[in-house]
Amino acid sequence: MSIKRSNKKWYFVFLMFPLFLAFIILRKTDPYQQWEVYGGDNGKIHYSSLTQIDTNNVKNLRVAWVYHTGDTNQIEANPIIIDHILYGVSPKLKLFAIDAATGHKKWVFDPLSGGKYKSNQSMNACRGVTYYSSGKHDERIFYTVGSTLYCLDAQEGQPVTSFGNNGTINLHDGLGRDVKNLSITSTTPGVIYKDLLILGTRVAEEAGAAPGHIRAYDVHTGTIRWIFHTIPYPGETGYESWDDKESYKHAGGVNAWAGFSLDTAKGMVFAQIGSASYDFYGGKRKGNNLFANCVLALNAATGKRVWHFQTVHHDVWDRDPPTAPVLVTILKHGKKIEAVVQLTKSGLIFLLNRATGKPIYPIMETPVPYQSELVGEKLSKTQPLPSFYKPFARQTFTEADLNKYVSDSSYRDIKKKFLTYKKGFYAPPSKKGTLMLPGLDGGAEWGGPAFDPQTGLLYVNANEVPWVITMVDINNGENSSLKQTNLEAGMFLYRSNCMGCHGERREGGGNYPSLVGINTKYNEAAFTQLLASGRRMMPAFNQLSTSERTALASFILNLKGKKNMLYVNNAKPKDSYLKMPYSVTGYIKFRTLEGYPAINPPWGTLNAINLNTGKVVWRDTLGDYPELKAKGIHAGTENYGGSVVTAGGLLFIAATKDAKFRAFNKRTGKLLWETDLPAAGFATPAVYQVNGKQYLVIACGGGKLKGAASGDAYVAFSLPAN
């Protein structure tokens, strides 16, 4: 039977229509075609199925556009793209919407403008935003500034007044106790399940911290629909794990600060839970402290616990999981298993059955031989250690590992210190100083890993920098019956409230700035305002009385007119739970006299791990110090922010101090492309397409590490037009 020429076209269309329809359906159902959720998708695998940019043409990438926020400082945000609009956040927490193909501004919302909300805000880190839509006439963006959760119209950039209190929710509300004077914010965006916004929080890390309960808000009204008590109430699972049965009334921390993953088909939300406060001394919180340091699975509709797994018992090392659980499918003996992967700061990989929380491979409760010298401390006798996956970061530090690329005097200095420190993977904090490797910033960090469903490879960038935790007595100076000057009282208040971050000598350390010479920047009024509002990593200290603030200012600012005045304590009596007998002297990295880590390189690595076999497929040093690179030393740098893996065969990552943006062959680890950014990209890239053209974008705020210049830009890349 012949077909007439006039009918051939329609016959061809008839044959191709099913393929065309399948293509349209695939685009609609493939969650990896766009970047509409923080981390790329609800499973937090940082994966893009786009293939336009691949291993052959990645070398041709060019800057497509640059958007300057106008605020210069750290930007840790992973932007989202809805249709052709990109939503991001500036260092001063302005929320903006721009054209994702051109970078042209659509609108900017400034929460501090006009002074309307200014008194309730502080400059917290903001790593992203959450989008909700029930149709074109109801599109919302949720994000947090200080202690305020905002709900904005996604098209206009104005508060949705029907939500909460004229578009805002105070995160102090609804926690079951009075926390109005305590620090609480949300640095990582929540997730949307149906008509719920599920949100975690960042709270302070001293004893007087707010509880980290998880809340689900109605996306339309702001009403709390459910709350999960991360510090259990009587009758709830985990209550027995706190020796002090009043802990639910006063203990703090135990918060889902790094966000969530979500399995919509199962109706389950998965959280990492932070450590209990106070971080480095647990004598006032004996027990295993559930649900601290847990992977936690909840029914997303009701908030009811489905299962939990604790990665550290009674944590006194600040070794809480630093990133949201990752939802993966692995092969075991040829059988597909839906699983949850949880990485830790200590370089461990926990793999759990997604439905039950049971380990897929044995996780051994391993005896820990250490005892604490701190009075009242009671450590766990065992800790869980995975047996199948090897650590992705070094966990031992011997004299042979001391940095050999330094001067003789510098080597003698670090060796002398090294020999005095206590050592061991679970050696507790001590008065002589305890060496921690990986340090307090990982191992893994908040940027999180990427997972490639095509190959089963998990990619994790790791820090390999040693830190030292040193404890000191702080109770000797507390005696309200003694006559003290403001200076003397301020010294005590500094040790109990500030020293843990800013150091014994106020020199700062880690992510915390030096306070030396701060009196040239702040007068007493400005300093008092800073205590009330907080700023970025610094929480608010509204729990301090007027006299305590004056005394603290007298010490830190060296107020000549007030430091020798008699201190009159008008503070309310403090609960004995808040009176810690010890404090850490600061978040101190173990460094050489030249300022480099005291351990031999590498100091930052990028690791590709096959989750099906447990094997490390490739590992590369990540980042460079230019002056060391010139000497032939590929040292790596500390890195913050995650990677993205694509179906085009690529792994993209910035994250390093040297302000580079790199692309690796995802199968071999070969470096295929790198470019200079205007400032370090301490953030996770986003990959998306507009009108069939693929882009990748990275926030370039820099500033986080000493010597890393600050910036204000989001930079997008694409292939040049044909």
Image (tube, helix red, strand yellow):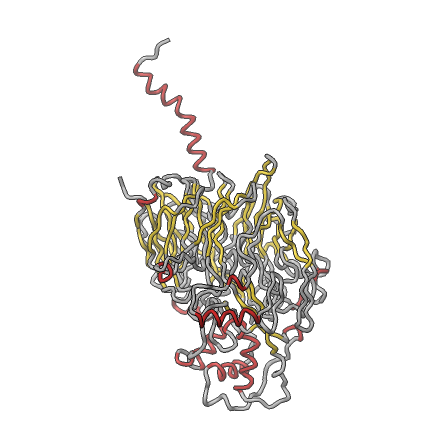
Residue 47 percent location from the top left of the image: 46, 44
Residue at point 66%, 57% (across, down):
383
344 left or right, relative to 81: right
568 left or right, relative to 366: left
Residue 598 vertical placement versus 549 (above, below): above
Q: Considering the image in quadrants, where does the N terminus appear?
A: top left
Q: Quadrant of residue 225?
A: bottom right
Q: Is residue 127 visible?
A: no
Residue at point 52%, 66% (across, down):
467
371 left or right, relative to 56: right
Residue furthest left in the image: 722
Q: Considering the image in quadrants, where does the C terminus appear?
A: top left
Residue 650 percent location from the top left of the image: 41, 43
Residue 225 vertical placement versus 29 (above, below): below
Q: Is residue 699 visible?
A: yes
Front-most of residues 438 and 228: 438
Residue 393 percent location from the top left of the image: 53, 55
Residue at point 47%, 78% (across, down):
528
